Image (spheres, grey):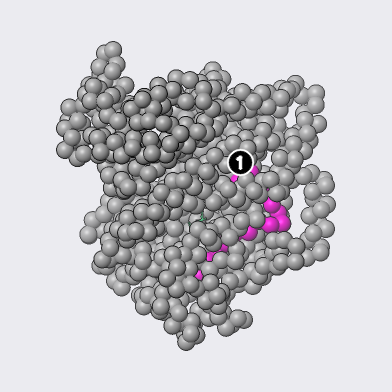
């Protein structure tokens, strides 16, 4: 331990922005000799070709992008997938009713016939990766600086999409090192994915939001799916006659257990980091963006929870949306605290000074940071209003859905009305309201609307408000200082809007009419705030993000030059990455040591019968009392190991990722990060950062002993 600390200190003093121990989300196809040597030194027993190969089967073929933003892994020759409970959550909720409540009671398919189709769910396998930097740079070389962000998006979208070569492949081009490199990823997407198993929420989400982002942790965060294909091997939407997917590669599952210090490798699709964020960006986040987002989410969550606890049907309806909002409500609150605690601002300022020292005499970097500062200074006065629009006003599901009507309004109000534009906008409105109607709970939405209108009026700078809207509100509904005023207005919106009346909504989309639209209380409210922003502030925002893009691009160009010869990894951007580290205990603060594992004894310590977050299934309590652990028992503790922690560098999107041992066998599923290192998107902490993983033996124990689904265990290849 001492030795590790000494080497770390040496590393820091040489260059504080050097990659620290275990930092790095490496692009799988670009693992260099140096990084591979690090991996083998740490314990890896696989060849580079076994990690990633373009021509033969490799580990990457067992890893999928699950749904819109998680990772899953193939664990059997019949396309069985493991991922997190919180990744399958919306599908488990959508499959549930009050009478067949799989969120509450869990679900186990005892045969393939019992598996449940999940409309809308897909998984994507990575086929290949190509460097397209030259092509992209050529296309954007004459773009005006103020148009760069919009034009770049257009160019990347044009280069992405379904291929027309009959393979059905999809491609996406992603930007790396802030626009200094572009890579094209080709994927095969499968759209018949079925639910196979899920534990009750009292296991899969044990500890709820209280324990979320925290270690020690006792959550059994897993769910099980299966991917299907047409008989000819091609992807196909759900069809009864589809057959289980035959993978090129699947993972073996180790029940040998983990020890402190063991090698751990994580493959997956981390969503986003910003490790080269500047001090100015950190300051904006700490002072304005994060705290306001947290305040607004807090208000929305309270409104939702009030209704969820009253009625199990509402709980099922709102559960997934609530969990998503709550997850990043706690994240951003913790991120602010850790950014301040670790003094990331000063850390960034120091890095920027070092860069300036290096850049001295290189004229292209002159005034880089003063330019960045000026850009932030000019946007700062408007940043709060933008958060209040996106997280407040648009936090009302009704207003968010209503905002989709703006494009239709514009199409209908055009000087020369284009029928195709009207048809397209109408279709988008229909789709948006179809989604909205599925999950709309008017009681909580009404309360959210009243609250956010009130908060916006009181918190946002008076001269940045939609004045006409609030003046009218005052005239028609009364004193803007009184909560009652907003409540009365919200009540009227929900009673009178045609958007909430199925018959009137259908009549409207069949024959869209701007007069009706402008009279509608929901739409006119949304429009007042959208227009206020679009007409007065969006130009500042556009200017801010395009100058930031140009500066960031230049900064990274310099960093790449300055650090030539060093192994560098690009920021996460939902492309496949691998990270490596060790199972490792840690000390979060003075006098406290955290062990590297949590066990079922800890579940019993936290167990609170009837509690919303800490209840546990009766069957689990019985199994624990009887010590009926079977082959999944941990010999050292004579208990079941529920979770363990590793030093790996991951972030949101890695959820569900396989945690592999030195031989590439599955030992766990990554599902969270620890509170003490929640600044990790901006700055990786080499001492405190931990990845929280479900021990796969707990998964197997729950499936087998609690779920009685031996059929699932029998499908796996266990390494004992
Ligand atoms: N923090 C986890 C992640 O972002 C999600 C955990 C979900 N559980 C919960 N209690 N909300 O990957």
Q: Determine whether the residue tagged by mark 1 lies in a helix, strand or loop.
A: loop
Give residue 245's position: percent from left, percent from top.
34, 59
Residue 365, relative to residue 262: is it above or below?
A: above
The residue indicated by pointer 1 is 274
Q: Position of residue 525 (x, y in %)?
A: 35, 30
**Residue 273 image offset from top left, x and y in percent:** 58, 44
28 over 389 or under it: above or below: below
Question: Within 10 angstroms of label 1, few (less than 14), some, or many (20 or more) residues?
Answer: some
Which residues lie in the magenta part? 681-696
Quadrant of the image for the N terminus?
A: bottom right
* In the depicted structure, whether residue 473 falls above or below residue 64: above
Question: Which corner quadrant of the image does residue 492 belong to?
Answer: top left
674 relative position to 318: left or right: right
Residue 275 on the magenta segment: no
- Residue drawn at x 31%, y 21% as measured from the top left: 410
Q: Secondary structure of the magenta portion, mostly?
A: loop
Using residue 12 as the reference point, say whether residue 573 is left or right of it: left
Nearest the viewer among 35 and 707 is 707
The front one of 216 and 199 is: 216
Residue situated in front as seen by the camera: 716 or 103 = 103
Q: Is residue 22 visible?
A: yes
Q: Residue at x 46, y 65 (%)?
A: 613
Which residue is at a point 37% across and 56% down the rendered structure image? 308
Task: Identify which residue, 642 or 715, lies in the foreground.
Answer: 642
**Which residue is painted at 79% across and 44% down in the image?**
15
475 left or right of 128?
left
């Amino acid at each position: 331990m001492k030795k590790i600390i000494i080497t770390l200190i040496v590393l820091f003093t040489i260059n504080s922005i050097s990659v620290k121990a275990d930092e790095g989300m490496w692009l799988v196809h670009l693992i260099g000799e140096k990084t591979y040597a690090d991996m083998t030194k740490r314990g890896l027993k696989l060849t580079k070709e076994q990690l990633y190969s373009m021509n033969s089967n490799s580990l990457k073929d067992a890893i999928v992008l699950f749904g819109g933003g998680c990772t899953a892994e193939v664990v059997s020759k019949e396309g069985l997938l493991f991922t997190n409970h919180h990744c399958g959550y919306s599908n488990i909720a959508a499959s549930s009713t009050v009478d067949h409540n799989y969120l509450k009671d869990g679900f186990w398919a005892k045969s393939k016939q019992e598996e449940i189709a999940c409309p809308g769910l897909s998984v994507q396998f990575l086929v290949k990766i190509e460097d397209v930097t030259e092509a992209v740079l050529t296309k954007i070389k004459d773009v005006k600086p103020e148009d760069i962000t919009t034009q770049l998006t257009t160019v990347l979208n044009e280069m992405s999409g379904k291929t027309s070569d009959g393979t059905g492949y999809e491609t996406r081009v992603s930007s790396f090192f802030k626009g200094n490199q572009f890579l094209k990823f080709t994927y095969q997407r499968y759209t018949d994915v079925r639910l196979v198993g899920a534990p009750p929420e009292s296991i899969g989400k044990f500890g709820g939001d209280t324990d979320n982002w925290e270690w020690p942790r006792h959550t059994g965060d897993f769910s099980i799916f299966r991917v299907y294909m047409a008989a000819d091997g091609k992807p196909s939407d759900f069809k009864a006659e589809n057959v289980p997917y035959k993978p090129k590669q699947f993972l073996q599952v180790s029940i040998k257990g983990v020890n402190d210090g063991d090698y751990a490798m994580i493959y997956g699709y981390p969503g986003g980091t910003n490790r080269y964020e500047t001090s100015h960006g950190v300051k904006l986040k700490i002072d304005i963006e994060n705290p306001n987002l947290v305040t607004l989410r807090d208000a929305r969550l309270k409104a939702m929870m009030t209704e969820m606890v009253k009625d199990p049907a509402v709980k099922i309806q709102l559960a997934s949306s609530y969990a998503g909002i709550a997850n990043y409500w706690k994240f951003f609150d913790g991120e602010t605290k850790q950014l301040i605690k670790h003094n990331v601002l000063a850390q960034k300022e120091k890095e920027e000074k070092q860069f300036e020292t290096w850049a001295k005499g290189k004229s292209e970097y002159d005034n880089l940071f003063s330019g960045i500062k000026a850009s932030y200074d000019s946007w700062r006065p408007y940043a709060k209003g933008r958060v209040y629009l996106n997280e407040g006003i648009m936090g009302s599901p009704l207003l968010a859905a209503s905002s989709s009507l703006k494009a239709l309004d514009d199409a209908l109000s055009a000087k020369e009305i284009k029928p195709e534009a009207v048809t397209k906008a109408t279709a988008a409105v229909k789709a948006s309201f179809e989604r909205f109607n599925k999950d709309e709970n008017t009681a909580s939405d009404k309360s959210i609307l009243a609250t956010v209108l009130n908060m916006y009026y009181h918190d946002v700078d008076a001269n940045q408000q939609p004045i006409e809207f609030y003046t009218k509100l005052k005239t028609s509904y009364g004193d803007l200082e009184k909560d009652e005023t907003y409540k009365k207005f919200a009540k009227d919106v929900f009673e009178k809007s045609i958007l909430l009346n199925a018959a009137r909504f259908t009549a409207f989309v069949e024959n869209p009419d701007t007069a009706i639209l402008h009279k509608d209380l929901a739409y006119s409210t949304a429009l007042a705030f959208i227009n206020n922003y679009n007409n007065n502030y969006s130009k500042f925002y556009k200017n801010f993000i395009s100058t930031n893009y140009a500066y960031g691009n230049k900064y990274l160009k310099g960093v790449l030059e300055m650090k030539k010869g060093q192994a560098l990894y690009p920021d996460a951007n939902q492309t496949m990455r691998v990270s490596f580290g060790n199972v490792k205990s840690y000390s979060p603060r003075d006098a406290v040591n955290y062990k590297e594992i949590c066990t079922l004894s800890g579940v019993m310590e936290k167990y609170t019968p009837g509690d919303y977050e800490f209840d546990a299934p009766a069957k689990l309590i019985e199994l624990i009392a009887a010590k009926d652990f079977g082959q999944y028992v941990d010999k050292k503790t004579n208990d079941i190991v529920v979770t363990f922690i590793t030093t790996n560098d991951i972030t949101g999107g890695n959820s569900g990722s396989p945690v592999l041992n030195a031989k590439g066998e599955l030992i766990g599923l990554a599902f969270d990060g620890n509170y003490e290192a929640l600044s990790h998107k901006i700055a990786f902490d080499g001492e405190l950062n931990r990845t929280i993983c479900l021990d796969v033996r707990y998964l197997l124990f729950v499936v087998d002993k609690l779920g009685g689904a031996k059929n699932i265990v029998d499908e796996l290849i266990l390494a004992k």
